Amino acid sequence: MKFSLSTNIKSVQLNDFHYIATANARRVLGSIIAEYDSGVRSFTMIGTYGTGKSSFLIALERDMALSTNLLFNNKGQFNNYKKFHFINIVGEYTTLSNLLRDELEIDGTNSKEIFAQLDRTLKSHKAQNEFVLIAIDEFGKILEHAANHSPEQELYFVQQLAEFINHPSHDNVLLITTLHQNFGAYAKKLTEQQRNEWVKVKGRFKEIVFSEPIEQLLHLAAEQITTSNRKVIADKNFDKLFQLAKETRFINNDLDIHVAKRLYPLDIFSAVALSYAIQRYGQNERSLFSFLMSKDDNSVSNFEPSATKTYNLANVYDYVIYNFYSYLSEVNADSANWRAIRVALERAEEILDIEKVDDAIKIIKTIGLLNVFGTSSILFNLDALCQYVYIALDISNPNALIKELEALKIIRYAKYKSQYFPFEGTDVNIEDELYKAVGQVPRPIDILDDLNACF
């Protein structure tokens, strides 16, 4: 199966288009249908880069044109129309009127001529019992152009288009646009009065959030991943890892072990961490499929698992550092965590005996990713860490090495969080000092009763 980093709604071949329908995609379509029934005709789907908005539009077109039922079974949800015509536009740094004029093949530049032609187009298709779906992908480029060039005039045309589509007499048309960020975010450079106009136009479109939760990304990966019919090696160990993820609160109880097994040779820890990394630093589904289809040395395709070795957190660390290095080099919310990992790795290479370095580095990378992508509620003590390291990293005696790393202050165990951290090193026992501080800091005095007596 071929994979493309980007999808162009104007040039894709519907017959060759592969799409994995997700619960989120069906939810979005359900919202569009419900709002359409209530009289809404203009929509904006908002989702970050690579979430699959363009693919969703193509899947919807394919269902309508070819009755493929990828997203839904057409039973006349759109005013009982069974035939459809599509006007697909990919946004550019130009005016929306220019793009519509080119699509409708209009010679004039006057907005009245454009809407007159669009009205004739809708009536012509209605006479043929056809529903018209207008899709404008990359709508943000049009809004950016509008914000930089005659914003009042350009925005007024956008408003006119939405009002034209939403008019009750146009019962055979639907407008769907896609954005990477909120409509109002494109108006940051404008004056307050212009931003107010922007908000007014925004109200002509029904906004729908298009984002895939972590569980859905895991489901997509499970659907896509190919392992040449390779079965899980050592089912008992894999089950132990899955149970460990639940006991340590790294995953919630709703995640199905059968989905986890379809992700093999990724274990559930590495799969979740990878999904979070892709959401934070990459482009969601686009980055996910890039990972799954990759054939490089650190790819899951070329990985050889064993009974005590999965595509683990240490492997995910290497992949994330290599593929998202430019983003991680910039200041971001996780910068402190990534710096702590890097310092701990450097210190391990300097201090440890050479025969222990490789295993120590894997453990530090594992601890680092547990901190970066784990929630504040995870509990990962020595027993839990040893179990993961033994089953997933193929390290036969992790207990002694972990204690040595702790003694050398390369990692530390925080009792108050029941979790290990990469450590830059200090002679101060931070946990003990925190406990001491609790006894030294005076409790706040409740003066409310004293104040009440004065009023």
Image (tube, rainbow, N blue to C red):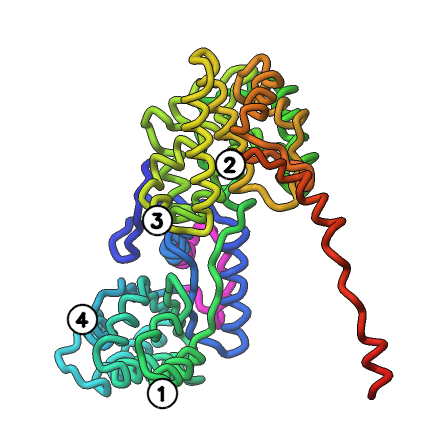
Q: Disc 4 and disc 2: Cα gap in Å?
A: 50 Å
Disc 3 packing (10 Å; few <14; some 14–19; many ≥20):
few
Q: Look at the numbered disc 1 and give the secondary structure of its residue.
A: helix
Kindly identify which residue carries mark 3.
Answer: 330
Q: Mark 2 points at which residue?
A: 369
Residue at 54 percent across and 35 percent down: it is 426
Q: Which residue lies furthest to the left in this view?
A: 107
Task: Please check the rendered image and state whether residue 23 is part of the magenta-colored stretch, yes or no.
Answer: no
Q: Callout 3: helix, strand or loop?
A: loop
The span shown in magenta is 60-82
Of circles 4 and 2, which is in front? Answer: 2
Helix, strand or loop under label 4:
helix
Nearer the camera: disc 1 or disc 4: 1
Predominant secondary structure in magenta?
A: loop
The residue wearing badge 1 is 193
- CB of mark 1 within 8 Å of CB of mark 4? no
Image x and y of residue 309, in percent: 52, 19
| Disc 2 secondary structure class | helix
Under mark 2, the amino acid is Leu
What kind of residue is marked 1? Answer: Gln
Tell us which disc is closer to us: 1 or 3.
3
Question: Which is nearer the eye, 423 or 171?
Answer: 423
- Pair 3/4: label in front: 3
Q: Is residue 201 left or right of residue 444?
A: left
